[in-house]
Image (cartoon, helix red, strand yellow):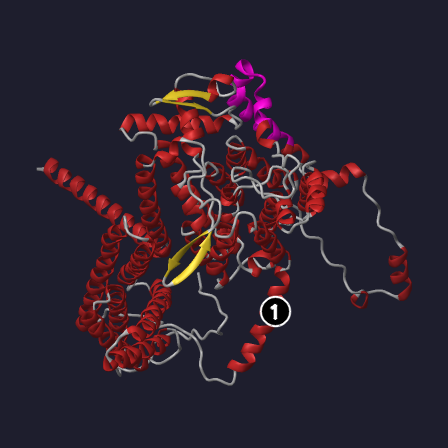
């Protein structure tokens, strides 16, 4: 009997422990989903896009014979071509080479066969009836390990030779995580990190050169930014080894060791106190004069150096780095001590062979000398070539950047601002090295530059003195714009745009001053307009009565069902973007992006109904995203109505488009609850009118976008109704005042 009671008590205690554990786990998962809902949407959208592009790459690789030779198989070549997008003809000339099959697959097989990388036989391979002689392997050993691992995986799973491509694309995709982390930490703003990750994942240069052509910079880019993120999080050892690992993939990453040296060498110290004003000093005139006459004692050079530089810690880090490199390089030091001769091949330059009249061939990297050749200035081009090819300008520039970084003060409590400046100077150094480097650049070299575009795309991020950096529209527009300036133009002229981008970053402070001036001017104008910007925000949603409990649960069920449905719908429709032309693919991806962006927001509303802070934050992001989707639908409806033949339908669509576009602003304008209720009803009417006509006319794109907008507005209306039910009079506004100026950022 006693044993039975004791057993029952044990079982009950275990049951309560399990229940408590499950409850805490559920709370943590809910918190993670709410806080990272936008990041989840970004990564899912990015994964879908990358999977579609990678699938196209595999199909092209396995069905095209052009991969078997060292040719410029994509380009076009020798002259630019045009592509028509939404009725506009765009001239382009992207670079594409068969390095993957000619070099990477070749070296991967040879490494698996037991051939050592830095030997003549490593450059010879007979495979599938094709003899390939590609010369010497010139990269550090981690590159060979990666290629061998890709071939091994391909053989293991029966993929063929595209296993290396999967690894390279995988590293490229995973780089979005450290980019998000770096941007988030350096800006102290989660939204900035999410936008940086999104602009990286959807960047056309990254998609083309990493996900489609499978070029090899992706691993070292991943390891550098992962390492720098660890340095930001004060994981000194891990960050150091990750950045050193980047240097063991490719020589281009050696330049990225400069910020690591600075980080390890410069010591943190307290900011010196400002001198007190003489008018606030106590004492008579004689004492003050004596204080002025006193000269501060100068410190010995040794003490000055030890105060500024962490020589002891730097020495320890050097020992750790050398030990790590020695362990990696030990087999090659013993078996192939002349490996440095092979590495030096990647540091060489390409000769114009005395021809400064014609553009260089397609397989030669671009240099700024080519701009003078294309301008018909052969003498000046030859003179500039003699200067650039010496390596002097590049070495001098690196030394200057190193010196500026070393002189940058590193004060306690200002670590993020310090690292933000160091990373920006690293970006400028890398950009300048690509411009004046003796070797020259192919377009795929800018794979290493694109993450910097995504992180440093606003003047506040570049020169802001505060820890918090607000979101700005330039963070979404500039990374893609700068990339297109490199990817699309004729390869003989795109260096002009690279120089222009460098110059724009140099004068970024001027744009910041101009922005501040325009902002003050806009404030003066808006003060006369009785409109403030604020999204729906609630004080609390109580569950004290049966009526309120019922409303809460109905709201939860509807929002979570609609949210999950939109998310699943986005995943399902993404299949239709496979194997279609560019215009159709972009249209499908637009719908996918809207569905997968809105879905998690709606689910987060259901999960956060019991937490006012989380609910208001989710409502704010939902309101902005729903407004953006409504503007897309409204403007798209208005523009598409121009091509409708029947006058009544054309006018009705134009009216619906204008109506939806204007009333979408109600989601982000400060107003009473009952006004929001009326505005949502009017929005639903405009959407229904547009959808009805588009269903009859058969425009599937605007049909799908309209349905998504309809779901978002319905959920917004449900939340408004829930708030009205929980107020005593039914129309009392329960929102927390959140009036914002036009330039205010989206909160974290």
- Our reading of the magenta stretch's main secondary structure is helix
Judge whether residue 403 can be spotted in this image: no
Is 333 within the magenta? yes
Mark 1: secondary structure:
helix
Quarter of the figure with the C terminus = bottom left
Give 686 or 210, whichever is nearer the viewer.
Answer: 210
Question: For mark 1, what is the residue?
Answer: 514
Say above or below: 233 vs 162: below
Spot occupied by residue 638 in the image (x, y as percentages of width and height) = 33, 75
Left or right, residue 577 beside residue 9: right
Seen at 59% across and 59% down, the residue is: 464
Q: Which residues are magenta?
A: 315-344
Spot occupied by residue 220 in the image (x, y as percentages of width and height) = 49, 37
The answer to which quarter of the image holds residue 96 is top left
Give 472 or 294, whichever is nearer the viewer.
Answer: 472
Seen at 33% across and 70% down, the residue is: 636
Seen at 40% across and 62% down, the residue is: 88
Figure label count: 1
């Amino acid at each position: 009997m006693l044993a039975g009671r004791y057993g029952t008590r044990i079982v009950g205690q275990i049951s309560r422990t399990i229940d408590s554990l499950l409850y805490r786990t559920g709370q943590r998962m809910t918190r993670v989903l709410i806080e990272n809902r936008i990041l989840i949407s970004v990564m899912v959208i990015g994964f879908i896009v990358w999977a579609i592009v990678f699938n196209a790459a595999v199909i092209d690789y396995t069905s095209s014979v052009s991969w078997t030779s060292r040719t410029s198989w994509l380009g076009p070549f020798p002259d630019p071509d045009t592509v028509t997008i939404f009725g506009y003809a765009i001239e382009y000339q992207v670079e594409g080479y068969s390095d993957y099959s000619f070099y990477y697959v070749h070296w991967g097989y040879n490494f698996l066969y037991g051939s050592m990388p830095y030997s003549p036989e490593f450059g010879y391979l007979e495979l599938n009836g094709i003899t390939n002689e590609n010369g010497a392997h010139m990269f550090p050993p981690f590159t060979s390990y990666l290629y061998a691992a890709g071939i091994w995986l391909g053989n293991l799973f029966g993929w063929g030779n595209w296993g290396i491509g999967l690894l390279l694309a995988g590293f490229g995709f995973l780089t979005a995580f450290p980019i998000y982390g770096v941007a988030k930490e350096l800006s102290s703003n989660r939204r900035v990190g999410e936008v940086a990750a999104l602009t990286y994942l959807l960047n056309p240069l990254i998609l083309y050169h990493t996900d489609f052509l499978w070029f090899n910079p992706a691993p070292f880019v991943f390891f550098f930014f992962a390492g720098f993120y660890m340095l930001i999080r004060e994981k000194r050892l891990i960050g150091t080894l990750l950045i050193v690992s980047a240097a063991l993939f490719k020589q281009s990453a050696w330049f990225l060791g400069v910020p690591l040296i600075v980080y390890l060498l410069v010591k943190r110290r307290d900011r010196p106190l400002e001198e007190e004003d003489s008018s606030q000093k106590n004492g008579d005139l004689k004492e003050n004069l004596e204080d002025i006459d006193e000269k501060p004692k100068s410190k010995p050079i040794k003490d000055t150096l030890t105060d500024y530089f962490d020589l002891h810690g730097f020495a320890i880090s050097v020992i750790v780095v050398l030990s790590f490199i020695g362990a990696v390089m030990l087999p090659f030091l013993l078996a192939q001590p002349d490996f440095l001769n092979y590495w030096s091949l990647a540091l060489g330059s390409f000769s114009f062979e005395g021809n400064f009249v014609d553009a260089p061939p397609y397989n030669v990297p671009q240099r700024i000398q080519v701009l003078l050749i294309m301008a018909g200035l052969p003498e000046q081009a030859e003179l500039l070539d003699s200067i650039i090819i010496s390596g002097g300008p590049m070495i001098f520039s690196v030394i200057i950047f190193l010196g500026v970084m070393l002189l940058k003060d590193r004060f306690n409590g200002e670590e993020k601002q310090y690292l933000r400046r160091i990373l920006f100077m690293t970006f400028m150094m890398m950009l300048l090295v690509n411009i004046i480097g003796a070797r020259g650049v192919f377009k795929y070299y800018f794979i290493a530059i694109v993450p910097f575009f995504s992180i440093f795309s606003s003047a506040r991020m570049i020169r802001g003195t505060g820890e918090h950096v607000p979101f700005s529209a330039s963070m979404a527009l500039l990374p893609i714009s700068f990339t297109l300036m490199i990817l699309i133009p004729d390869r003989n002229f795109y260096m002009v745009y690279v120089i222009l981008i460098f110059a724009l970053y140099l004068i970024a402070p001027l744009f910041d001053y101009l922005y501040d001036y325009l902002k003050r001017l806009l404030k003066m104008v808006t003060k006369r307009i009785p409109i403030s910007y604020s999204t729906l925000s609630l004080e609390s949603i109580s569950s004290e009565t049966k009526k309120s409990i019922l409303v809460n649960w109905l709201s939860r069920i509807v929002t979570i069902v609609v949210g999950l449905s939109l998310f699943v719908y986005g995943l399902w429709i993404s299949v239709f973007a496979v194997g279609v032309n560019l215009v159709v693919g972009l249209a499908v991806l637009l719908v996918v992006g809207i569905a997968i962006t809105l879905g998690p927001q709606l689910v987060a509303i259901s999960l956060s109904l019991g937490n006012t802070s989380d609910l208001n934050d989710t409502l704010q992001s939902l309101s902005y995203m729903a407004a953006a989707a409504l503007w897309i639908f409204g403007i798209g409806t208005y523009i598409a109505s121009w091509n409708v033949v029947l006058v009544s339908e054309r006018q009705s669509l134009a009216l619906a488009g204008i109506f939806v576009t204007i009333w979408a602003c109600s989601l982000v304008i400060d107003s009473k609850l009952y006004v929001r209720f009326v505005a949502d009803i009017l929005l639903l009417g405009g959407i229904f009118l547009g959808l009805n006509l588009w269903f009859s006319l058969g425009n599937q794109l605007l049909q799908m976008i309209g349905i998504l907008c309809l779901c978002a507005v319905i959920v917004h209306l449900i939340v408004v109704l829930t708030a009205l039910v929980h107020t005593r009079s039914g129309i009392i506004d329960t929102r927390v005042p959140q009036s914002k100026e036009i330039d205010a950022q989206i909160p974290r």
